[in-house]
Amino acid sequence: MQRKMVLRVWIEGTIFAAIAMALSFLPVRIGSSFEISLGMIPIILYSLRRGGKAGILSAFIWGLLHFPLAQVYYLTVFQVIIEYILAFGFAGFAGAFSIKLQQAIKNDNKRKGRFLIVRAVFLGTFMRYFWHFIAGILFWGSFAFGGMSPVAFSFVMNGLSGLATAIVASIVLVILFNVQEHLFIVKETSG
């Protein structure tokens, strides 16, 4: 019975990763360095449903899906590891708020639930874009505009992308929570 439950969790995580990847194909990129990552929405939703460990695995799978779909920007092996393995995997840390959110839902505390969702979004987004920031300094600095330092360039580009992603994901997930709260909880069935 327990193995069946674990399998169900991992299958669900893989489906959420695939949805995140599909959303990654929507055109929300401005230039070569700024984008709003809509794939964060299903990853954070899944992380809040199932917790941090499952969220990290699902986000990691999302990162891996970039490879067979030829969505990897490759400079070096280390850059690819940082930006597609570490960065995406760390997005699942949004699940750190899963237990508190489940409790808020159980207590019918919608205000606290919305607050926890926003906190989870910003944590997961910060954790992901921190690694993109590091990669920006180490690998993408030579592409900085007009003599900008690699640190400033990476901070501005990844900071703006991360902030825009967090704002959009927060809005969408709070609206989703208000109208379909049951998506954030898991009601296990036997069999």
Image: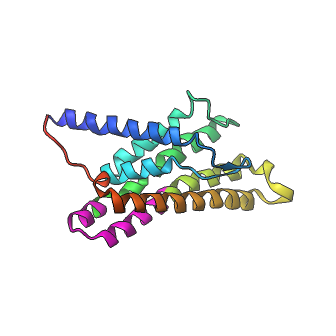
Q: Nearer the viewer, residue 89 or 107?
A: 107
Q: Residue 125: x, y in percent?
A: 51, 57
- What secondary structure do most residues of the magenta stretch adopt? helix
Q: Is residue 142 left or right of residue 159?
A: right
Q: Is residue 109 magenta?
A: yes
Residue 63 drawn above or below residue 137: above
Q: Is residue 101 left or right of residue 122?
A: left
Number of marks in picture: 0
- The residue sitting at the front extreme is 179
Query: Can the viewer see residue 177 in this picture?
Result: yes
Residue occupying the point 30% across, 58% down: 181
Q: Residue 74: x, y in percent?
A: 68, 35
Give the colour scheme shown.
rainbow
What's drawn in magenta, residue-wise?
Answer: 101-124
Q: Is residue 91 magenta?
A: no
Q: Nearer the viewer, residue 173 or 160?
A: 173
Residue occupying the point 75% across, 56% down: 150
Q: Residue 161: x, y in percent?
A: 63, 56
Instruction: Tell me the quarter of the image containing the N terminus.
Output: top left
Query: Can the viewer see residue 92 in this picture?
Result: no
Residue occupying the point 79% across, 49% down: 143
Q: Residue 78: x, y in percent?
A: 63, 39
Q: Nearer the viewer, residue 123 or 20?
A: 20
Rendering quarter of residue 67: top right
Residue 80 drawn above or below residue 169: above
Q: Nearer the viewer, residue 143 or 169?
A: 169
Q: Is residue 129 left or right of residue 154?
A: left
- The residue sitting at the top extreme is 68
Instruction: Tell me the quarter of the image containing the C terminus.
Output: top left
